[in-house]
Amino acid sequence: MAGSLIVIPTFNEKQNVASIATAVLSASTESHLLFVDDNSPDGTGALLDELAAGDSRIHVLHRSEKEGLGRAYLAAFAWALEQGYELIMEMDADFSHAPADVPRLIDAAAHADLVLGSRYVDGIRVINWPLSRLILSKGAAFYVRLITGMPFTDPTGGFKCFRRQVLQEIDLNRVQSNGYSFQIEMTHQVWMKGFRVVEVPIIFEERRSGQSKMNRAIVLEALWRIWRIAYQYGFRRRPRAKHPLSVGTREPSHG
């Protein structure tokens, strides 16, 4: 199986999953969806099974308990690699990431190893956030750049697209972050290995329904774990060289 897989973790997202599935598959008809449900008590998992039964492009990975965003994505990555997908995308279930932007990230992956959907490249494009949340997000981005040296405007974002070989090159069993720091750690590993990372501007909208998963513990984990992420590479401020498998190192196709 080839093509693109969009991974959407869920926990108590029953209000959103049917509509997000319809919107994403309408925007990118050739893509498949993988929902990863952490045993949602609101019945999200059962609804997802119904959706999957009615559309062969929809898949569901059930997990026995709520273990966090990072563990859900790692399980999904392992499944995606086993199934042979070439592009693996992360996306939220709550419409904060616009389904219409999915094809743009997929197109950008033709010339990059990791595509980051950025709220802040070439300006700020965030809808319905209070100023305090925007300041926290922008401050976190600055903090990450200061400690790690990563040049990206939105290193904490969760709308991104990996090429298959990138995930194969990362030892996923050693990824320790779980909350929003998971996004930072994954991007940092890809960047430090010399893969080509690009940012694509997106519009981010505060969730339309349901409850945000952001909490104090997630923020605190991200604050201290960034130091550990940087330490793993000796606080090096840039990759040593381009990765030999990066799209930036390949010969152009003439076929």
Image (tube, rainbow, N blue to C red):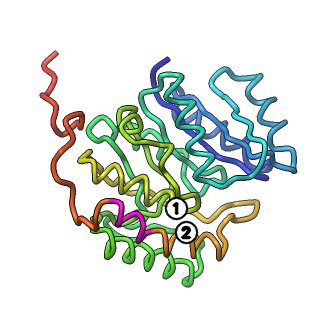
Residue 172, image x and y in percent? Answer: 48, 43
Q: Label 2 sits on what residue type?
A: Ile
Give yes or no for contact between labels 2 and 1 (Cβ–Cβ under 8 Å): yes
Residue at the image position 52 percent from the left and 55 percent from the top:
176
Please tell me how crowded label 1 is: few (under 14), some (14-19), or many (20+) other residues with Cα within 10 Å. many
| Place of residue 245 in the rendered image (x, y in percent of width and height, measured from the top left) | 24, 33
Q: Quadrant of the C terminus?
A: top left
Q: Horizontal and vertical percent for residue 209?
A: 74, 60
Asked if residue 227 is among those painted magenta in the image, a careful observer would answer yes
Residue 122, image quadrant: bottom left
**Residue at image x 57%, y 30%?**
79
Identity of the amino acid at label 1? Phe
User: For residue 60, what is the image quadrant?
Assistant: top right
The residue lying toward the viewer, choosing from 194 and 91, is: 194
Return the residue at label 2: 127
Residue 94 in the image: above or below residue 149: above
SS for callout 1: strand
The disc placed on residue 76 is: none
Q: CA distance from mark 2 to mark 1?
A: 6 Å
Q: Residue at x 79, y 53 (%)?
A: 12
User: For residue 167, what is the image quadrant?
Assistant: top left
Is 107 colored magenta in this rendering?
Answer: no
200, above or below 121, in the image: above
Magenta range is 226-232
Return the residue nearer the eye: 117 or 171: 171
The residue beneath circle 1 is 204
